[in-house]
Image (tube, grey):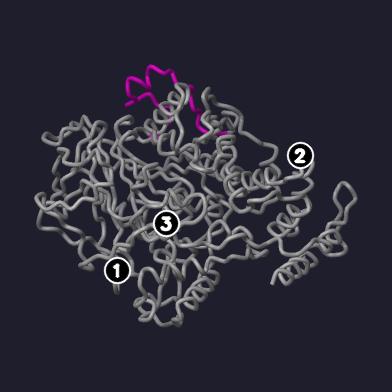
Amino acid sequence: MESWHCLLLLCSLSLVLPSGEATKNDDGIDLVSFLRRIYPGLLVRDEPFIINGDFEINSPEEPGRPEVLSITEQTKDKSFNQDTNEAPGPVVLTKDGQIKGVTVDKAHIFYGIPYADPPVGAYRWKPPRPVSPWPTVYDASFPRAACMQACSGPITEECPRKVSEDCLYLNIFVPVDVNFSSPLRSPLPVMVWIHGGDFIAGSASKPLYDGRFISNFTHTVVVSVDYRLGAFGFLVSGKDPHASTTGNYGILDQQAALLWVQRNIAVFGGDPGKVTIFGESAGAQSVSLHLMIQSSKPLFKQAVLQSLPFSIPLKTRHDALKLGKGFAKQTNCSVSNIVCLLSLTPQAVLAAQMKTSSKIVNPFRFLEVFETWGPYIDGELIKEQAVTAFLKGHWQKEKPVLLGTTSEEGVIFVYAVFNKPVSAVESTVYITAIFKQHALRILHKYLPLYRDADRRDMLAQIVTDYIFLCPSRRSARAGTAAGSGVWMYVFDHVASDPRVWSGLTFCYQHACHGAELPFLFDSAPVANFTMTLSEKLLSNRMLCYWGAFAHTGDPSSRAQQTTFCREQRLPVWPRYSDNSGWLVMNLTVRSHAQVGTRSHICDFWDKLGIY
């Protein structure tokens, strides 16, 4: 098998690098001839995905009904947020029934509110349905189980302990000074968080995303949303919604949650006309899709895109169907037999999902290693790639957008895939596999910049530039040209505490993918590090910017800022435009506006035209 893959790769190279084309680098090495001498078997992942045996799968006792608990019949999991146990809390009346939350030192919290009926049984692969009203007071004092998922490798310890198909819930955090016994003089802006996790993992209740601090600090109502993941959220087996699975359910879940917010957030003190959606990684991809989806347009006012992997392509219908066929094969069901697929246990669905995630990287679709499951272009809900939509202006350009990346996004991906040093020869193989006829120009650009025998840092920088930074810059410039309000940032801070990121210890030396999250949510202890005073100040300043954006659509606006933010005399974050010199905000201990980082490199990628 390994030899076959190497032969396949070499054949592909012969096709994309014809004999009449120069194939030598600056050292006079003929790359095609060189590659023919490489030992085969480089494109194999070291270990398969393994389902974590420690987690617990919950099955709803009454399919189709949300969990309803009267105040006198609470059955909390005491391991969840113990500071909420027996705490006093407000009661609100939503359109679906009464809800009782808890009050803690920084916020009023309403955990695990159902926004749709459970997608179980015959409704497993169906669009979300409106939630059924409940007759008694709903206990919102503890989080519910996360959506079905499994983890392996260094992130296993971050996995939710309880998972279930019954998982369409959201959490709401309200500033502690809001008095529910009297109406607010003016409703508060709403920030809806869509979590990341490669569309196969993550949870709204992940401690890293605890919304109580950001809510209280920015004086906004914060909502975090769970949505179906992996095969449960994105399996495609055909086109007929009545006889097959048609995918994109996870995105429809997010839409349903946003609609629930529109209908109910006012009773929590929120303004449905001032909703900001924000997310990181796959969450940012989700945000970008809602900016493109016409039916999502009335559900929010503005957006924050944190570390959007623009250049990881959404699947085509053909690719999604191929993945679905492979999934069905693992279950011994026919891909056209929806009855058989629906009869599978949640454990069987999850096991088939993990087995379908290829252990061998396809040299023709190398980037899919980063996103096996997820949204696909169905031609109706999602009509094109996000980067294409931004470049062509096929998005809601009237909405203010704040977007950015970390300075070293690619480190965590490359070091997770390649746990051993990568030689110059091996890196050449991978670059050629990904970029084909463009490989020589890319190698010519990057090889001279890296002299270490281990070329993983070079690969990490290419991932950062090609997938994250440069397409974000290109999209921001396209939005600016169309008259949109765009603000860009780069998170460039290296944590001072080497314990950061729970086992991924190399990330303390880099501003890795997701490195901004503990600063934004004030969740450093969860990320296993302690902030210095200067890092705490950086965290506060980031919250000032995000809060100002939620209140006014401009991160530098002083209107509605807290006293603390006004006293900080924050550096002005200029709107991204040619008139400002294309300035971006560098978020580090000494935050400052600067000319965009790696401009000459992004100019190179822009001219290459392969986003």
Q: Against 336, is 432 above or below?
A: above
Residue 188's image quarter? top left
Q: Earlier in the sequence, mark 3 or mark 1?
A: 1
Q: Pointer 2: what residue?
A: 449
Q: Nearer the viewer, mark 3 or mark 1?
A: 1
**Residue 356 marker:** none
* Residue 534 among those drawn in magenta: no
| Residue sitting nearer the eye, 289 or 153 | 153
The kind of secondary structure element at disc 2 is helix
Q: Amino acid at mark 2?
A: Leu
**Dot 2 alpha-carbon crowd within 10 angstroms: few under 14, some 14 to 19, many 20 or more:** few
Label 1, secondary structure: give it.
loop
Q: Amino acid at mark 1?
A: Val
Q: Is residue 278 above or below residue 489?
A: below
> Measured from the top left, where is residue 527 in percent x and y?
44, 38
Q: Is residue 563 magenta?
A: yes
Q: Which residue is mark 3?
A: 293
Query: Quarter holding the N terminus?
Result: bottom right
The structure residue drawn at horizontal position 52% and vertical position 39%, both measured from the top left corner, is 404
> What stretch of residues is rendered in magenta?
553-577
Q: Earlier in the sequence, mark 2 or mark 1?
A: 1
Q: Residue at x 42, y 34 (%)?
A: 524
Alpha carbon distance from label 2 to label 1: 53 Å
